[in-house]
Amino acid sequence: MPVVSAPGMRPVRMGENSVEMTRGADGVFYVKSRFALGDYPRSMTDCLRRWARETPDRVFLADRGPDGAWRKVTYARALEKARAIAQFIVDRGLSAERPIVVLSGNSVEHGLIALGAMMAGVPFAPVSPAYSLVSKDHEKLKHIFSLLTPGLVFAADGKPFEPALKSVMTPDIGLVVARNPADGFASDSFDDILATAPTDAVEKADAAVDPDAPAKFLFTSGSTGMPKAVINTQRMMTCNQVMISTAMEFLKEEPPVLVDWLPWNHTAGGNHNYGIALFNGGTLWIDDGAPTPAGIEKTVRNLTEIAPTLYFNVPKGYEMLCEHLSRNEALRKRFFSRVQILQYAGASLSKHVWDTLERLATETVGEKIMIITGYGSTETAPFAFTTTWPVGQPGEVGLPSPDIEVKLVENIGKLELRLKGPNITPGYWRQPDKTAECFDEEGFYKIGDALKFVDPDDVSKGFIFDGRVTEDFKLSTGTWVNMAGVRTGLIAAFAPYVRDAVLTGLDRNHIGALLFLDLDAARRIAPELAVADEEHFAVHPAVRLIFQERLDELAKKSTGSSNLVARAIICDRPPAIDAHEVTDKGSINQRAVMAARPGLVEDLYNDPPPPHVLVAKRN
């Protein structure tokens, strides 16, 4: 177990990894680790039973109650409650054909429902709360219910979900709520199901769990259409946790402590982070915050009280946290006191945020904290690649975990990534056509992304994310545009004022961009518009002046039409979830945005350009 260290960095015990590469026909590369993964548990409930036996009084889950105080559940109590829930599920005759849908977000009750479902051998499906609470037409929720045909629905707070329930509930679907029952629906209270007396039927159901059967359905974000139900098995989840602890050896030294907001309806929060706590006998303090102006205050409160031993966030979350770390000494001291690593995912971490984290850590505790990243997807459970060393440049994803086979296929100048291993999904529930499409003739999962070597002469240095293989497009001149590279550079050039961007240019003469504002940052330019929306900022002279300057600076750095963003428009309204322009986790759907705003796309190519179009000047 090597200790990874560098001058001025806190030592941390990480795992060893070494890979070998072979060449196949037609320029195909095969890469795999020289190490084997070893044994892993049959089920995540085996982990619960282990820690309930070995450390019964250790807190497993905690969240903030309505009064703001922490509600804590120990491993012993979690097992007791999970058995009662499992009996309730068994009594209702639920199955994979009639699974459980969880509508609400992270909570102690949600975590216990998950354990009870796994113990009963019945799949559960955490669904994005946005599909119920933000969407007005509930189309994605209707699609999910049609696909799954659930037998039971859980919502922590019934009242806010009333409109959504009216859209999807039928008389044969049961409902459980923790508080505030929804009007017009018969329901069981969560406290009542905890009073169910478990029988030996629970132990029989748990013992009969097939590690390769569906244990959980996680929905893709729907960035390219309606969400698909990704089958997650117990084998996927348990082997993935062994992969994680093999890479992060320090998890074996002491029980991890997590303070985490990442939603459980996504694989990073629901599998990776929830699983780290459960698999390693740790404690997960559920952060009720988020990287939003209101949510970050809650995150700061929680991190000021609880010091994590490892920390996960998205780049925007780190950016907002840095602002508070910079001016809050108590937060800095607590946050950096014992954290072993800082991990980010979902996008590249900007250099100024990276530098700020390292500077603040050094000023506070006298040493930097290692920043790592990785790569995976809902279909990979999610852990597939990670860095176990200090990352040297944006986009690095590291090396594949033991027992994962990598296949790299030439695809229009890129290396398309395909994966095989025990953590890979068997497919999409009740969508055999989609399942068939996602595997190649050798059984490798086609993830749709591309990687490139950090050093083509030394595969041990790992890989760099190289965008989606299907996103790149050609201009009318036949010149290829690397979507990921241009878009990343564009957003970085406009930081912190642009939250996201959509590139245009397929079969056109130049690249155009639709820019979506970060309103919090834009208010620094025009503080007099404190409560205004995008429409006012998009036409504000000071905002347009700064955006014109940034566009011109970016143009001067371009090397040709393949990376020159020639025109841009500041969008006057945010992307809409009901128009499928944005997913519940904030990912932009490029095609949906262009389809919903055809007039703006045409404005980018009209001559002369309309007044609201920014035109890049290179001289």
Image (tube, rainbow, N blue to C red):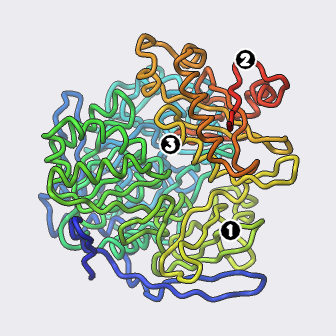
Mark 1 or 2, nearer chain start: 1
Q: CA distance from mark 1 to mark 3?
A: 30 Å
Q: Position of residue 130 (x, y in %)?
A: 51, 33
Kindly identify which residue carries mark 2: 611
Q: Is residue 135 left or right of residue 48?
A: right
Kindly identify which residue carries mark 1: 416
- Assign a secondary structure to mark 3: loop
**Residue at the spot x=63%, y=57% of the render?**
467
Q: Is residue 145 visible?
A: no
Q: Is residue 49 left or right of residue 237?
A: left
- Assign a secondary structure to mark 2: loop
**Residue at the spot x=41%, y=35% of the render?**
155
Q: Position of residue 24 (x, y in %)?
A: 71, 87
**Disc 2 crowd, CA 10 A, few/some/many (<14, 14-19, 20+):** few
**Disc 3 crowd, CA 10 A, few/some/many (<14, 14-19, 20+):** many
Q: Position of residue 400 (x, y in %)?
A: 49, 75
**Residue at the spot x=78%, y=55% of the render?**
480
Q: CA distance from mark 1 to mark 2?
A: 41 Å
Kindly identify which residue carries mark 3: 127
Q: Nearer the viewer, residue 573 or 186?
A: 573
- Assign a secondary structure to mark 1: strand
